[in-house]
Amino acid sequence: MRALKRTQSIGLLVAAVTAAGLVPLAAGQAAAAPAAKAAGYAGSCPAAGTVTQGWHSGHDGVDIANSLGTPIYSTGPGTVIVSGTASGYGQWIRIKHDDGTVTEYGHMYERLVSVNQRVSSGQLIARMGSEGQSTGPHLHFEAHSSTASTRGMDPVPYLNERGVGLPCTPGSGTPGTNFTTWGTSVRVRADARLNATVVRTLTGPTAVYVQCQKRGDIVNAEGYSNDAWSYIPALGGYISNIYIDHPSAWLPGVSEC
């Protein structure tokens, strides 16, 4: 349990680090357990349209058909690793997300992002086309477990785990939860400041969608110090990352506000 790891004081943890000859913690970081693999991101709808073909042994993704020029969006935050032309696709884009997974978009007639560009969840990245091996305007969407993956996984459960069901409408609905809070009487404040108005108080662990995070006042609690705060739109405010149940002081896969 995350709560159990928070019972040690910073002094004890620093003493252990010094004795082990490890690199000391940077200022503003929580003295926490080693960073774990990034949690799956809260997803966004890649494109509106009709699913005309699903994932099967001869088809690595799903096809979403709509009219020429229909907007295509990134399903999550990440970095563009491919944006160009490819045999079969005509034009394609690949995005490596902060949880290590990769999404792939094909057949567009216009690309709006470039390699090494940072994108956010729901950001417009292209417009639907019918280039390459295609019989009509559609998005071919794939999901891969990593950059080393040679075959796409089924995108339907991949998107479902991130709060998106197909078919979908871009920009609608509530994103899926991506973190859980811990502790009781956790105050949600209007801003990342200790003197900001308390807008809610959480009575216990709560599944939440963290939209973004930013630096604010340093919070000292449970033997930890951290100046990172998470914005939770459903609660209308911020809570200290100390009370987000994750071993990293700065949450992976979450953009800066």
Image (cartoon, grey):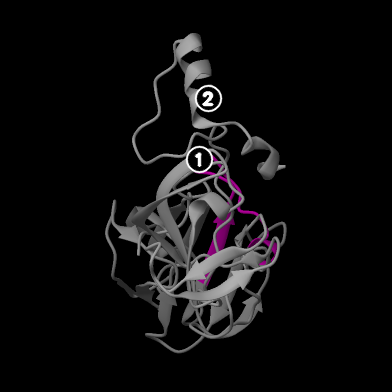
| Crowd around label 2: few <14 · some 14–19 · many ≥20 (10 Å) | some
Horizontal and vertical percent position of residue 114: 27, 59
User: For this view, does 52 lie left or right of residue 34?
Assistant: right
Work out whether 160 lies above or below 103.
Answer: below
Residue at the image position 41 percent from the left and 85 percent from the top: 70
Image quadrant in which the N terminus is located: top right
Q: Is residue 233 magenta?
A: no
Residues in magenta?
Answer: 140-158
The answer to which of marks 2 and 1 sits earlier in the sequence is: 2
- Amino acid under disc 1: Tyr
Quarter residue 212 falls in? bottom left
Residue at the image position 28 percent from the left and 70 percent from the top: 112
Q: Which label was assigned to residue 246?
A: none
User: For this view, does 34 lie left or right of residue 206?
Assistant: left
Horizontal and vertical percent position of residue 39: 58, 51
Horizontal and vertical percent position of residue 210: 52, 65
Q: Which residue is mark 2?
A: 13
Q: Which residue is mark 1?
A: 224
| Crowd around label 1: few <14 · some 14–19 · many ≥20 (10 Å) | many
Q: Is residue 148 magenta?
A: yes
Q: Is residue 125 visible?
A: yes
Q: Is residue 88 visible?
A: no
Q: Dot 1 lies on which element?
A: strand
Q: Nearer the viewer, residue 36 or 68?
A: 36
Horizontal and vertical percent position of residue 58: 68, 58
Gap in angstroms between the C-alphas marked 2 and 1: 10 Å
Q: Residue furthest bottom?
A: 67
Verify CB contact (< 8 Å) between mark 2 and mark 1: no
Q: Dot 2 lies on which element?
A: helix
- Amino acid under disc 2: Leu
